[in-house]
Amino acid sequence: MAGFKIEQCDPSEYEDTINEFWEKYLPATGQNRLQWLQNNPAGETIWLMAFDSEGNEVLGTITVMLRDLYLNGRQIKAGAFGDLMVSEKCRVFGPALPLMRAAVEIGERNNIDLLYTVPNPSSLKLTERIGFEKKITLKNLVRPVRTKAYLDKKLKIAFLSTMLSILTDKVINLVPCLTLLLTGRKIQLHEQLDEQFDRFIEKYEKQLAVAGSVRSREFLTWRYINNPKYNFKVLSMSDKEGICGYISFCEKNNKILIYDLVYFSNKVLRTMINSLICYASRKNMQAIYFSVTSASDLPGKLKKRLFIDANADVDVMFRSDNEFNDIEEWIMFDGDRNI
Protein backbone atom coordinates (compact mmCIF):
# COMPACT_ATOMS: atom_id res chain seq x y z
CA MET A 1 0.00 0.00 0.00
CA ALA A 2 1.52 3.34 -1.03
CA GLY A 3 0.70 6.86 0.00
CA PHE A 4 -0.14 7.82 3.56
CA LYS A 5 -1.48 10.97 5.13
CA ILE A 6 0.29 11.77 8.40
CA GLU A 7 -1.56 14.19 10.67
CA GLN A 8 -1.32 15.43 14.23
CA CYS A 9 -4.63 14.56 15.82
CA ASP A 10 -6.70 15.13 18.91
CA PRO A 11 -6.62 11.58 20.36
CA SER A 12 -10.03 11.98 22.00
CA GLU A 13 -11.56 12.00 18.51
CA TYR A 14 -10.03 8.57 17.80
CA GLU A 15 -10.34 6.97 21.22
CA ASP A 16 -12.06 3.81 19.98
CA THR A 17 -9.48 3.31 17.22
CA ILE A 18 -6.56 3.86 19.61
CA ASN A 19 -8.02 1.38 22.10
CA GLU A 20 -8.46 -1.17 19.31
CA PHE A 21 -4.83 -0.70 18.24
CA TRP A 22 -3.64 -1.06 21.83
CA GLU A 23 -5.69 -4.21 22.31
CA LYS A 24 -4.30 -5.74 19.12
CA TYR A 25 -0.69 -4.53 19.05
CA LEU A 26 0.18 -3.52 22.64
CA PRO A 27 -2.17 -5.70 24.70
CA ALA A 28 -0.47 -4.93 28.04
CA THR A 29 -1.55 -1.29 27.80
CA GLY A 30 -3.65 -0.24 30.78
CA GLN A 31 -7.15 1.13 30.55
CA ASN A 32 -7.52 4.91 30.75
CA ARG A 33 -3.97 5.46 29.46
CA LEU A 34 -5.20 7.87 26.80
CA GLN A 35 -6.52 10.43 29.29
CA TRP A 36 -3.51 9.85 31.55
CA LEU A 37 -1.09 10.72 28.72
CA GLN A 38 -2.88 13.99 28.10
CA ASN A 39 -2.61 14.98 31.78
CA ASN A 40 1.21 14.94 31.77
CA PRO A 41 2.40 18.01 33.77
CA ALA A 42 5.27 18.42 31.28
CA GLY A 43 2.73 18.92 28.51
CA GLU A 44 0.06 17.01 26.61
CA THR A 45 1.34 13.99 24.71
CA ILE A 46 1.56 14.59 20.95
CA TRP A 47 -0.34 12.07 18.79
CA LEU A 48 0.40 11.51 15.11
CA MET A 49 -1.69 9.20 12.94
CA ALA A 50 -1.20 7.68 9.54
CA PHE A 51 -4.30 7.51 7.35
CA ASP A 52 -4.78 5.80 4.02
CA SER A 53 -4.38 7.94 0.92
CA GLU A 54 -8.06 8.91 1.07
CA GLY A 55 -7.90 9.85 4.77
CA ASN A 56 -10.56 7.36 5.80
CA GLU A 57 -8.77 4.61 7.74
CA VAL A 58 -6.17 4.84 10.52
CA LEU A 59 -3.19 2.66 9.60
CA GLY A 60 -0.68 3.64 12.26
CA THR A 61 0.13 5.80 15.27
CA ILE A 62 3.06 7.27 17.19
CA THR A 63 3.24 9.45 20.31
CA VAL A 64 5.76 11.90 21.71
CA MET A 65 5.54 12.02 25.52
CA LEU A 66 7.08 15.19 26.94
CA ARG A 67 9.70 15.19 29.70
CA ASP A 68 11.60 18.04 31.34
CA LEU A 69 15.34 17.54 31.87
CA TYR A 70 18.23 19.44 33.40
CA LEU A 71 21.33 19.57 31.24
CA ASN A 72 24.35 21.47 32.53
CA GLY A 73 22.25 23.78 34.66
CA ARG A 74 19.62 24.49 31.99
CA GLN A 75 16.11 23.08 31.80
CA ILE A 76 15.18 21.67 28.41
CA LYS A 77 12.15 19.98 26.89
CA ALA A 78 12.59 16.37 25.76
CA GLY A 79 10.20 14.03 23.99
CA ALA A 80 10.07 10.24 24.22
CA PHE A 81 8.72 8.23 21.29
CA GLY A 82 6.10 5.60 22.07
CA ASP A 83 2.95 3.86 20.87
CA LEU A 84 4.43 3.12 17.44
CA MET A 85 1.75 0.84 16.03
CA VAL A 86 1.18 -0.14 12.41
CA SER A 87 -1.84 -1.96 11.04
CA GLU A 88 -1.24 -5.54 9.98
CA LYS A 89 -2.71 -4.54 6.62
CA CYS A 90 0.45 -2.69 5.65
CA ARG A 91 3.39 -4.04 7.60
CA VAL A 92 5.84 -4.47 4.67
CA PHE A 93 5.62 -1.00 3.12
CA GLY A 94 3.78 0.60 5.99
CA PRO A 95 3.77 4.04 7.60
CA ALA A 96 6.28 3.38 10.41
CA LEU A 97 9.08 5.43 8.82
CA PRO A 98 6.80 8.30 7.69
CA LEU A 99 5.31 8.44 11.19
CA MET A 100 8.74 8.67 12.81
CA ARG A 101 9.88 11.36 10.37
CA ALA A 102 6.72 13.33 11.04
CA ALA A 103 7.30 13.00 14.79
CA VAL A 104 10.78 14.51 14.35
CA GLU A 105 9.31 17.40 12.36
CA ILE A 106 6.53 18.05 14.87
CA GLY A 107 9.13 18.00 17.64
CA GLU A 108 11.10 20.74 15.88
CA ARG A 109 7.95 22.83 15.36
CA ASN A 110 7.04 22.48 19.04
CA ASN A 111 10.52 23.53 20.22
CA ILE A 112 11.33 20.14 21.69
CA ASP A 113 15.08 20.26 22.28
CA LEU A 114 15.76 16.54 22.35
CA LEU A 115 14.04 13.36 21.18
CA TYR A 116 14.79 9.91 22.53
CA THR A 117 13.52 6.36 22.27
CA VAL A 118 14.33 2.81 23.31
CA PRO A 119 13.72 0.96 20.05
CA ASN A 120 12.94 -2.71 19.75
CA PRO A 121 14.99 -4.75 17.24
CA SER A 122 12.42 -4.26 14.48
CA SER A 123 12.50 -0.45 14.71
CA LEU A 124 16.23 0.08 15.40
CA LYS A 125 17.18 0.56 11.74
CA LEU A 126 14.32 3.00 11.27
CA THR A 127 15.48 5.19 14.16
CA GLU A 128 18.98 5.26 12.70
CA ARG A 129 17.62 6.28 9.27
CA ILE A 130 16.00 9.40 10.73
CA GLY A 131 19.13 10.54 12.55
CA PHE A 132 18.91 8.91 15.98
CA GLU A 133 22.18 7.86 17.58
CA LYS A 134 23.01 5.64 20.52
CA LYS A 135 24.20 7.75 23.45
CA ILE A 136 23.56 5.71 26.58
CA THR A 137 22.74 2.16 27.63
CA LEU A 138 20.23 1.06 30.22
CA LYS A 139 21.88 -1.64 32.31
CA ASN A 140 19.45 -4.21 33.70
CA LEU A 141 20.10 -5.73 37.11
CA VAL A 142 18.24 -8.37 39.09
CA ARG A 143 18.33 -9.24 42.77
CA PRO A 144 17.03 -12.78 43.39
CA VAL A 145 14.67 -13.12 46.35
CA ARG A 146 13.67 -16.74 45.73
CA THR A 147 16.64 -18.66 44.35
CA LYS A 148 15.17 -22.03 43.33
CA ALA A 149 14.79 -21.14 39.65
CA TYR A 150 18.44 -20.04 39.50
CA LEU A 151 19.67 -23.12 41.35
CA ASP A 152 17.60 -25.44 39.13
CA LYS A 153 19.60 -24.20 36.13
CA LYS A 154 22.92 -24.80 37.88
CA LEU A 155 22.39 -28.04 39.77
CA LYS A 156 20.00 -29.98 37.50
CA ILE A 157 18.87 -32.00 40.55
CA ALA A 158 15.43 -30.91 41.75
CA PHE A 159 15.67 -32.22 45.33
CA LEU A 160 19.10 -30.68 45.91
CA SER A 161 18.19 -27.30 44.46
CA THR A 162 14.98 -27.22 46.54
CA MET A 163 16.79 -27.88 49.82
CA LEU A 164 19.61 -25.50 49.02
CA SER A 165 17.24 -22.72 47.93
CA ILE A 166 15.41 -22.84 51.27
CA LEU A 167 18.66 -22.21 53.10
CA THR A 168 19.93 -19.64 50.59
CA ASP A 169 16.68 -17.66 50.63
CA LYS A 170 16.76 -17.37 54.40
CA VAL A 171 20.35 -16.16 54.45
CA ILE A 172 20.20 -13.58 51.66
CA ASN A 173 16.88 -12.12 52.84
CA LEU A 174 17.23 -12.37 56.62
CA VAL A 175 20.42 -10.30 56.79
CA PRO A 176 18.88 -7.20 55.12
CA CYS A 177 15.81 -7.46 57.36
CA LEU A 178 17.90 -7.71 60.55
CA THR A 179 20.07 -4.81 59.38
CA LEU A 180 16.94 -2.76 58.74
CA LEU A 181 15.70 -3.33 62.29
CA LEU A 182 18.93 -1.89 63.68
CA THR A 183 18.81 1.36 61.70
CA GLY A 184 15.79 2.86 63.42
CA ARG A 185 15.00 4.95 60.33
CA LYS A 186 11.43 5.73 59.32
CA ILE A 187 10.31 3.79 56.25
CA GLN A 188 6.92 4.56 54.72
CA LEU A 189 4.80 3.40 51.77
CA HIS A 190 2.80 6.24 50.23
CA GLU A 191 -0.58 6.16 48.54
CA GLN A 192 -0.44 9.95 48.11
CA LEU A 193 2.52 12.33 48.02
CA ASP A 194 2.39 15.24 50.47
CA GLU A 195 4.39 18.46 50.88
CA GLN A 196 7.35 16.53 52.31
CA PHE A 197 8.18 15.58 48.72
CA ASP A 198 8.26 19.25 47.69
CA ARG A 199 10.98 19.96 50.24
CA PHE A 200 12.90 16.81 49.34
CA ILE A 201 12.83 17.53 45.59
CA GLU A 202 13.95 21.12 46.16
CA LYS A 203 17.01 19.86 48.05
CA TYR A 204 17.70 17.13 45.50
CA GLU A 205 17.62 19.43 42.48
CA LYS A 206 20.25 21.67 44.06
CA GLN A 207 22.61 18.69 43.96
CA LEU A 208 22.21 18.04 40.22
CA ALA A 209 25.63 18.74 38.74
CA VAL A 210 25.31 18.00 35.01
CA ALA A 211 22.23 16.09 33.86
CA GLY A 212 19.07 14.77 35.46
CA SER A 213 15.32 14.41 35.22
CA VAL A 214 13.14 17.25 36.47
CA ARG A 215 10.94 15.97 39.25
CA SER A 216 8.07 17.60 41.08
CA ARG A 217 5.37 16.29 43.38
CA GLU A 218 2.85 16.95 40.61
CA PHE A 219 4.88 14.96 38.09
CA LEU A 220 5.57 12.05 40.47
CA THR A 221 1.87 11.87 41.37
CA TRP A 222 0.93 11.75 37.70
CA ARG A 223 3.69 9.33 36.69
CA TYR A 224 3.27 6.83 39.52
CA ILE A 225 0.32 7.38 41.87
CA ASN A 226 -2.17 7.99 39.03
CA ASN A 227 -0.62 5.54 36.54
CA PRO A 228 -3.36 3.47 34.85
CA LYS A 229 -1.12 0.55 33.84
CA TYR A 230 0.66 -0.40 37.05
CA ASN A 231 -0.24 -0.09 40.71
CA PHE A 232 2.87 1.82 41.73
CA LYS A 233 4.05 2.20 45.29
CA VAL A 234 6.40 4.88 46.59
CA LEU A 235 8.67 3.84 49.45
CA SER A 236 10.38 6.67 51.29
CA MET A 237 12.92 6.98 54.07
CA SER A 238 12.91 9.89 56.50
CA ASP A 239 15.16 11.29 59.19
CA LYS A 240 14.61 14.21 61.56
CA GLU A 241 14.92 16.68 58.68
CA GLY A 242 12.33 14.95 56.50
CA ILE A 243 12.42 12.64 53.47
CA CYS A 244 15.95 11.72 52.41
CA GLY A 245 15.19 9.21 49.63
CA TYR A 246 12.47 7.33 47.80
CA ILE A 247 11.94 4.35 45.48
CA SER A 248 9.03 4.08 43.01
CA PHE A 249 8.22 0.48 42.15
CA CYS A 250 5.46 -1.83 41.01
CA GLU A 251 4.72 -5.53 41.21
CA LYS A 252 4.35 -7.53 38.01
CA ASN A 253 4.36 -11.29 37.39
CA ASN A 254 5.62 -12.00 40.91
CA LYS A 255 8.51 -9.57 40.46
CA ILE A 256 9.26 -6.10 41.72
CA LEU A 257 10.24 -3.52 39.09
CA ILE A 258 12.01 -0.35 40.25
CA TYR A 259 11.17 2.68 38.09
CA ASP A 260 12.76 5.54 40.01
CA LEU A 261 15.34 5.82 42.80
CA VAL A 262 16.56 9.03 44.44
CA TYR A 263 18.62 9.32 47.62
CA PHE A 264 20.95 11.68 49.49
CA SER A 265 23.58 9.25 50.79
CA ASN A 266 24.83 5.68 50.44
CA LYS A 267 23.43 4.89 53.89
CA VAL A 268 19.97 5.96 52.74
CA LEU A 269 20.36 3.82 49.60
CA ARG A 270 21.36 0.73 51.62
CA THR A 271 18.46 1.18 54.04
CA MET A 272 15.85 1.62 51.33
CA ILE A 273 17.11 -1.36 49.33
CA ASN A 274 17.12 -3.51 52.50
CA SER A 275 13.54 -2.40 53.15
CA LEU A 276 12.51 -3.31 49.60
CA ILE A 277 14.17 -6.73 49.91
CA CYS A 278 12.22 -7.37 53.12
CA TYR A 279 9.00 -6.26 51.42
CA ALA A 280 9.69 -8.58 48.47
CA SER A 281 10.45 -11.48 50.79
CA ARG A 282 7.22 -10.98 52.76
CA LYS A 283 5.24 -10.85 49.51
CA ASN A 284 7.02 -14.01 48.28
CA MET A 285 8.32 -12.26 45.16
CA GLN A 286 10.82 -14.01 42.91
CA ALA A 287 13.18 -11.11 42.29
CA ILE A 288 13.71 -7.34 42.15
CA TYR A 289 14.56 -5.79 38.76
CA PHE A 290 16.16 -2.41 38.15
CA SER A 291 17.42 -0.50 35.10
CA VAL A 292 19.74 2.51 35.12
CA THR A 293 22.11 4.10 32.64
CA SER A 294 25.73 3.06 32.56
CA ALA A 295 26.86 6.56 33.62
CA SER A 296 25.51 5.87 37.11
CA ASP A 297 27.53 4.32 39.91
CA LEU A 298 24.38 2.56 41.14
CA PRO A 299 25.17 -0.82 39.49
CA GLY A 300 28.36 -1.12 41.53
CA LYS A 301 26.61 -0.12 44.74
CA LEU A 302 23.70 -2.48 44.17
CA LYS A 303 25.94 -5.44 43.42
CA LYS A 304 27.06 -5.15 47.05
CA ARG A 305 23.41 -5.85 47.90
CA LEU A 306 23.55 -9.04 45.74
CA PHE A 307 22.14 -7.55 42.54
CA ILE A 308 23.57 -9.25 39.46
CA ASP A 309 23.58 -8.48 35.72
CA ALA A 310 20.34 -9.55 34.06
CA ASN A 311 22.05 -9.65 30.64
CA ALA A 312 19.21 -7.66 29.10
CA ASP A 313 20.77 -4.22 28.53
CA VAL A 314 19.05 -1.90 26.03
CA ASP A 315 20.35 1.10 24.09
CA VAL A 316 18.75 4.54 24.27
CA MET A 317 18.76 6.48 21.00
CA PHE A 318 18.75 10.29 20.80
CA ARG A 319 18.21 12.92 18.14
CA SER A 320 18.69 16.68 18.43
CA ASP A 321 19.75 19.59 16.25
CA ASN A 322 21.49 21.03 19.32
CA GLU A 323 24.75 19.88 20.84
CA PHE A 324 23.98 18.16 24.13
CA ASN A 325 27.29 16.52 24.93
CA ASP A 326 26.27 16.09 28.57
CA ILE A 327 23.34 13.79 27.74
CA GLU A 328 25.63 10.82 28.31
CA GLU A 329 25.74 11.88 31.99
CA TRP A 330 21.95 11.59 32.37
CA ILE A 331 21.04 9.10 35.10
CA MET A 332 17.99 7.65 33.37
CA PHE A 333 15.55 5.10 34.82
CA ASP A 334 12.63 3.14 33.43
CA GLY A 335 10.37 5.90 34.77
CA ASP A 336 11.82 8.23 32.11
CA ARG A 337 10.62 6.04 29.25
CA ASN A 338 7.33 6.35 27.34
CA ILE A 339 5.76 3.35 29.05
Image (spheres, rainbow, N blue to C red):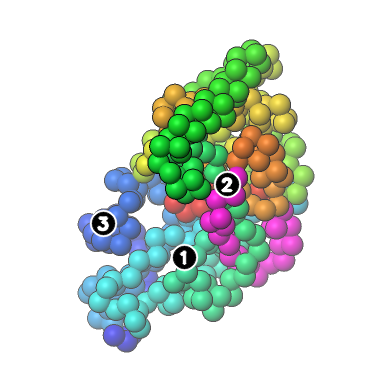
Rendered residue at 52%/61% (across/down): 118
As drawn, the label of residue 141 is: 2
Q: Is residue 39 magenta?
A: no
Q: CA distance from mark 1 to mark 3?
A: 19 Å
Q: In the rendered structure, which amino acid carries the disc numbered 3?
A: Glu
Give the secondary structure at mark 3. helix
Mark 1 in CB contact with mark 3 (< 8 angstroms): no
Q: Is residue 324 magenta?
A: yes
Q: In the rendered structure, which amino acid carries the disc numbered 2?
A: Leu
Give the secondary structure at mark 1. loop
Q: Which residue is mark 3?
A: 23
Position of 171 with respect to 254 (left or right) is: right
Closest to the observer, 277 or 38:
277
Q: Position of residue 78 (x, y in %)?
A: 58, 56
Q: Position of residue 58 (x, y in %)?
A: 27, 70
Compared with residue 120, is residue 92 higher up or lower down, i.e. above or below? Answer: below
Residue 307 visible, this angle: yes
Q: Which residue is mark 1?
A: 120
Closest to the observer, 108 or 339:
339
Q: CA distance from mark 2 to mark 3?
A: 30 Å
